[in-house]
Image: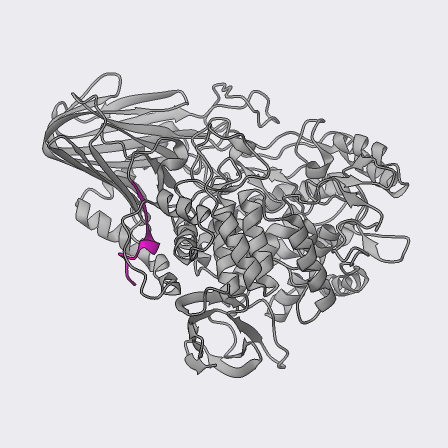
Amino acid sequence: MDYQHPAHRLDAAVPARAWTDAFPVGNGHLGAMVFGHPVEDRLQINDIDVWRGRPGTRSLPADAGEAFRQARKAVLAGDLDRAETVSRRTQSGDEQMYQPFVDLVFRLQGFDTEPDEVHRRLDLAQAMASTEARIGELELRSETTASVPDDLLLDYRTASAPVDIELTVSSHHPQSVRTLGNGPGPSARLLGTLEVGAPEHPDAGGTTPIFHPAGFTECVHAAWVLEIHSDGVITTTPDGSVLITGARELETRFASATQFDLRGRLRVPDQSALEAATIQLLDAAVGRDRADLLDRAVAEHRRLYDRVRLDGLVPGAGRTRKSTEERIVELSVDPSRDARPEVILMANMGRYLQITGARGEHPPLTLQGLWNHEVSPPWKGGYTTNINLEMNYWGSGPGATTECAQGLAGWLEVLAEQGAAVASELYGAAGWTAHHNTDRWGYAGPAGVGGGKPRWSLWPLGGAWLTSTLVDVQRFRGEVPDPALVRLQEGTARFLLDLVIELPDGTLGTAPSTSPENILVTPDGEEHELHISTTSDIALIRMSLEDLMDLSSRGAKFPAELMNRTTEVLKRLPRERVLPSGLVAEWSSDYISDKDPTHRHQSHLIGLYPGRSIDLEATPELATAARRSLVARGLDSTGWSLAWRICLAARLGDGPLVEQYLRRALHPVGLEGDVETSMSAGGIYRTLLCAHPPFQIDGNFGFLAGVCEALLQSHRTISTGGPGTRLDLLPALPPRWDRGAVDGLGARGGLSVDLAWDPDGVQAVIHRQGPGPDVLSVEVVHGQIRRRVNLEAGASIALAL
């Protein structure tokens, strides 16, 4: 892999001016936004376990179940006003908020001028944020990374002449800082302890930064340790700041921990044990010098990053000295310019954010991933399950980073445990459920405190969609389903089987029902949020129940009565419908319309992507209607919605439409604070972070998934009398992409695929990496060409098509 290729780096010629200008580094546990100012540099640090709240089940309102039954009765009777009013009585509080941790600030003493030169770089292949700067004759350099093997944030700084640096660690949360060890010298350690605090009310996530002291089991307590090495003299002060004098080199190592593990269990019994555990993280690295630590960190990052090579999409791409901002601005103003260099960079950025943001047994990626600087972040910085959390993991299979879903899998078990109580008490159902908003503690009830909008609050299909997402990630691994996943799927299925009711036309459906966050308009002009059996509800239920059947076919064991019930319900679920207008119906009545025809959610197209119920070959009429529906949504939307539209266009095999959405998704958005938060002006910030706006990371992962989907599709299966996968090569290639090469794309069945193509044909190499059956049958399709091959575990085959 050509690591010097501009597809593997972000560049900036000025220090970060806004938080979204900073470069993200992380290891799934610790993350930092690196601002890169040589005079006063800031590392804004996050620990993915630092949340408001605490473990424990949240209670539903006493009459929540009765309120749901009344809402169902009202909506079936056509009284939508009453249905929406009583549905608010099911709301059981707000999700908790993900919190910033600490700021580590380096202040260069004696300099108050702006630097003469600055070059910042985020090296995606090394997971390193670096800054080179000059102030007069003084040359400065810094490097920051986060290590997975050693669970440390590492920073190294050099100066061409001795300098004095003040170092401080501050937090939004109450903290105490003390020095560990002796007085002035070449090294020092600081220990910080802080308390995130309990929310003002135990069932309130809260929207204001109000904190109350609480005991060790009542809220998150955190400890951090900072180790400092320098060739200068290090002096600590009583307030916890540090002065380093006469330094040419400065190395810092940062470790942190909290008392709760992923499942909300205590890792340590008390505060002193927590501090000792944090110190131990640094002690474990005492024998390793900076070069050793860096080599270990880079090797582990590249173990995942090097699996996929996309830079061959632009054969012979040259070097560029332009900043990333210049590149995306030029692309936005020149419609004739080839977008491939920026598309590749954006896709690689998605893989980078996945690898650095989601590793190990830690809570899943939030709406902002691992990174957040606000005490009251947008949408509480938590988990939105009606598209956004799922999209965070769409790219992990095709992008060959399935390990990055480990935290999602562990956390879903927490969500399912609380969701079982909600399923029983609110819906009178078996199994488990989850609603639109949740948090790291597994809050599963309808969000809100009586004033929440039904169109997002009363949506019980979060558990189904999340489990389907995890099932699909597992398909890419090619493994026999693990017991935890089987339990999750069984619980999801049992809830859905109890949720559906018989409708007057004899089909099965849901009531009340929403099309997430959308508003319907009745023929008499009234606006409502609840109705009966929306298209998205049925598509998700079908997808989840078919997942159960698929898991069973691959070796999972489910009770016979559950399999029989699932088979019968699947027969009675209606298919998507085409309206007289030629669009896919979003609501169960042909006479209902959308208040906003360009709405950011495409929930009625879930069956197309990520589902499989709308297919170009199997359901061509529906596929045609889906394309019309997608085009009708328009080219302007939020950043994450544009990413979804790329995936939908790719699944439709429409290369020109894919290219349009790719270019629109790369639209540059101004500084946070300089633009009004918008529901329709999305794109990317200077650092390619997805802009809703504000920043929302799911669009980065959806963009990656869309690019992969245009190059390779593996969602179709083949009927061979045994296990099989179909590979569609280059199914939605944008017109300009007439030649290129990619390596290592992930495919379902535990496959990895290398592709090279030009106008004369396609060369493909298929590697079988996953376990599974002794022999896997693979059908390879490119246009009208079809080939069938059989692959044993560990085997590879080359094909020319």
In front here: 48 or 620? Answer: 620
The answer to whether any part of residue 700 appears in the image is yes
Magenta residues (range): 1-12
**Vertical order, 294 against 162 (above or below):** below
The answer to whether any part of residue 232 appears in the image is no
Quarter of the figure with the N terminus: bottom left
Q: How many marks?
A: 0
Q: Is residue 64 left or right of residue 112?
A: right
The picture places residue 136, in percent across and down from the top left corner, at 13, 30
**Vertical order, 380 against 329 (above or below):** above
Q: Residue at x 42, y 51 (%)?
A: 346
**Vertical order, 383 against 554 (above or below):** above
In front here: 431 or 226? Answer: 226
**Vertical order, 428 against 102 (above or below):** below
Q: Residue at x 63, y 51 (%)?
A: 465
The picture places residue 227, in percent across and down from the top left corner, at 22, 33
